[in-house]
Image (cartoon, rainbow, N blue to C red):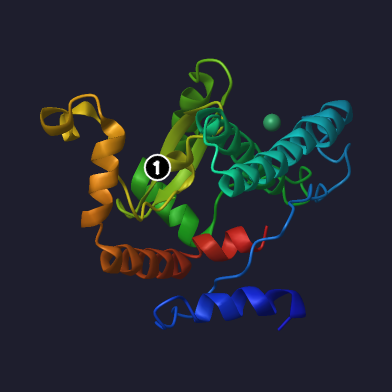
Amino acid sequence: MPDALGPALATAQEPPGGRRAPQGDRVAPPSEYALPPLPYAYDALEPHIDAQTMRIHHDKHHAGYVAGLNAALKKLAEIRSTGDYSNIQQLSRLLAFHAGGYFNHIVFWNNMAPENKGGGGRAQGALGHAIARDFGGVKKFREHFTAAATSVEGNGWGVLGYHPALRRLVVMTMMNQQDLVTTGLVPLLMCDVWEHAYYLKYQNRRADYINAWWNVVNWENVQERYDARCEARDSDGCMASARNM
Ligand SMILES: [Fe+2]
């Protein structure tokens, strides 16, 4: 085990109250995120995607999201230490935006390969069967994905994903880049803050409602959801493939 992980794992195994955290794939996050290199040369996707586009896209845009993610995490740590949450709305938005940009592009780069050197062709094996099952065939899937991605208003993404709850492949679109639901977020703990969830009792005092809600959070259920959903995803290879990117 790398020394760098020692303190973090020791903390995770001995939480307050003495209950041991389950073991598994928990790995301490890096203190700072780095821009991963492209898995091929800038001009490797020519003529379909030109080298200059790839260079700017990776070296400027993706790098900008990495810097933004690190800056947002650093600023959030600072405000936790000071207790001044006056900018929490903006920082939460920036964290989501840059985390989306960081992760989406890692998937994107690895989703591509030079033509005839891994690029092109069609899905095979279990994925091919799943596409046939869930979309009615490769041709229908391609038409569906193309139409969906083309229809995105403004900046965004087309996404093929495995939805753990539906246990099927789905095509979704994502405006901007921070809609984590479309990229496979597994919900563990959720609080409904629609007015219908609290208005009759708390009127406009949403913070009072949320403070009260903490008293009824079922943490055992949250833990069970974490263990079950992540293990299920591992069995589908989703998390394993994400770790390997
Ligand atoms: Fe991009």
Q: Nearer the viewer, residue 115 or 229?
A: 229
Above or below, comparing residue 131 to residue 150 in the picture: below
Measuring from the top left, give residue 42's x and y in whole percent. Answer: 88, 38
State the residue at coordinates (55%, 28%).
Answer: 90
State the residue at coordinates (44%, 49%).
Answer: 185
Above or below, comparing residue 224 to residue 139 in the picture: below
Residue, far left: 200
Q: Can residue 213 be seen by looking at this rendering? A: yes
Q: Quadrant of the C terminus?
A: bottom right
Rendering quarter of residue 244: bottom right
Measuring from the top left, give residue 157's x and y in whole percent. Answer: 55, 30
State the residue at coordinates (47%, 68%).
Answer: 234
Q: Nearer the viewer, residue 202 or 219?
A: 202
Residue type of the residue flagged with mark 1: Val
Above or below, comparing residue 118 to residue 16 in the picture: above
Q: Quadrant of the N terminus?
A: bottom right
Ligand 1 is within 8 Å of the C-beta of the residue at disc 1: no
Above or below, comparing residue 241 to residue 149 in the picture: below
Q: Is residue 205 left or right of residue 7?
A: left
Q: Can residue 120 be seen by looking at this rendering? A: no
Measuring from the top left, give residue 12's x and y in whole percent. Answer: 53, 75
State the residue at coordinates (79%, 38%).
Answer: 63
Q: Nearer the viewer, residue 20 or 127?
A: 20
Q: Helix or strand or loop: what does disc 1 sit on?
A: strand
Label 1 sits on residue: 170
Q: Is residue 57 left or right of residue 195?
A: right
